[in-house]
Image (cartoon, rainbow, N blue to C red):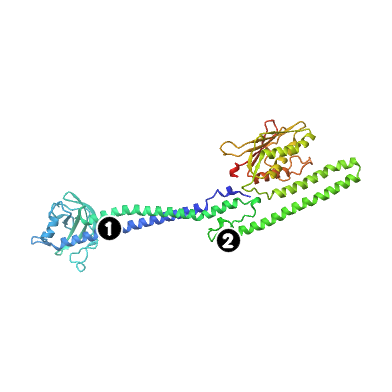
Amino acid sequence: MAGPEAYDRGWSLSRRVAVRAALAALVVLAAMLAALVLELEDVRGDLDDQSLQTQARQVLRYMTIGAGGDPVFDPPAAIAALYADPAGNEAFALLDEAGTFLLGSAGVRAPLSELLPAEDSRTSADADPHGLGDLGRPFRGEAAGRPVTGTGFRVQVDGRPLILQVGQGNDHPDVLADSLIEEFLENAAWWVIGSFAVLIGVTLWTIRSALAPLRRLSASAARIGPATSGVRLGGGAEGGDLPREVAPLVAAIDGALDRLDGALETQRVFVADAAHELRTPIAALRARIEATLPRDQAARITPDFDRLSRLADQLLRLAEVDTLAVAPGDRADLAAVARDVLAELAPLAVQRGRSLALDGAERPVPVQGRAEPLARLLRNLVENALACIPEDGTVTVRLVPAPTGDAEGPELLVDDNGPGIPPDRRARIFERFWRADRRRGDGAGLGLAIVQRIADAHGAGITVEDAPEGGARFRLRFPPPGRG
């Protein structure tokens, strides 16, 4: 089955939603800024057109053709003052149809711009008495040595077709309005960008906080195992604030866990009952055979009964440890456990011509756990080692207390001076019913599977290494007593 790391290759749901929300916000931001710029540019253009057209009408109102055929500009004093100062903000130039300069405001001696309006841009006399069109020919020009923004119109003065160019300096109110619009664009853009940045930040925070119950639910699901099979996702605090859309999925998972627990419990009960019920028939059959067969024949069959009895016992133990759970308040002393187990197995070692040694058990070595399952774990490791080492070999149990500072937990080492375990087999020795040498009939391949299960229940990691004496070393690393 794929572990959690198998699902880390793709993007998480929160990242997908966050990226899409950020992209959508950026697209909307860009569209808003573009629309704002276009709208304000359009407003600015309208303001320029209206202002310059108003100025052109003002000039044409007081423009006539004199007796000699030359144009004359005769405005009232207030209007004349606007065009009498060469450094003023308003200027005009009157040209003939060919673009030759005829008349201008103070200081203007040439056309304001070489750009001339189109020949068909003049409005009919019925629409406008001066033939002034709605739109002129915009330009950036110069009047009396100062820059102006203006436009040109094809007009009629007393029936004579002419070209009128009007311009405004940088201090003109309409030009100031343009500057204000540009400044607004610059400032508004930063305000809009800042607002969207805050919006994106709030969106990301909202997504993360909304998915927090799912992360807690995932952590709770990761803790479900054989020892915590009664835990359900929807029954704890994690299930109280789940989104409504996820609730059916959680309910379906809890239902599947219920069915799975039922099947596992049925299997465990069957294995335990079968192992328990096998003990009495095996013992009775062995007694009958020993009573009826000659001693030499019975002796050849007795090892088979020993293996059957051992298999039944291991199946029963395996069914027990499958439901093993270690409570936070459980405490055990590895030193006391090791002393008891080695004292129990010492007669067996002497009978087989092997030796047992214990190192590091002078002081208590506390761990979070239960003494009886830990004794079973150590007993299986020592029994396996005794079966593998040669005659006169030694099995050494070493205890390594937790380092100062309680950053790491204690260790339990079981060393032997046997043939060792090849590296290519170390990954499989904890599998159920796996044996390196199936020609040997003294085991069913369940002892190390029981060891692995007990170690898992205690949060201990177990590894196989080469022992200093050349044999095998089983190393169990327990978590600190306060962090199990």
Q: Amino acid at mark 2?
A: Pro
| Pick the front one: 161 or 84 | 84
Label 1, secondary structure: give it.
helix
- In the image, what residue occupies the spot 75% across and 49% down? 316
Residue 278 visible somewhere in the drawing = yes
**Residue 39 falls left or right of residue 439:** left
Q: Which circle marks residue 244 in the picture?
A: none
Q: Is residue 354 above or below residue 123?
A: above
Q: Which circle marks residue 248 in the picture?
A: 2
**Residue 88 falls left or right of residue 413:** left
Specify which label sits upstream in the sequence, 2 or 1: 1
Q: Which circle marks residue 44 in the picture?
A: 1
Q: Is residue 330 above or below residue 137?
A: above
- In the image, what residue occupies the spot 64% across and 55% down? 230
Q: Amino acid at mark 1?
A: Arg
Q: Position of residue 244 (x, y in %)?
A: 53, 61
**Residue at the extreme left:** 67
**Residue 79 falls left or right of residue 482:** left
Residue 429 visible somewhere in the drawing = no
Tag in front: 2 or 1? 2
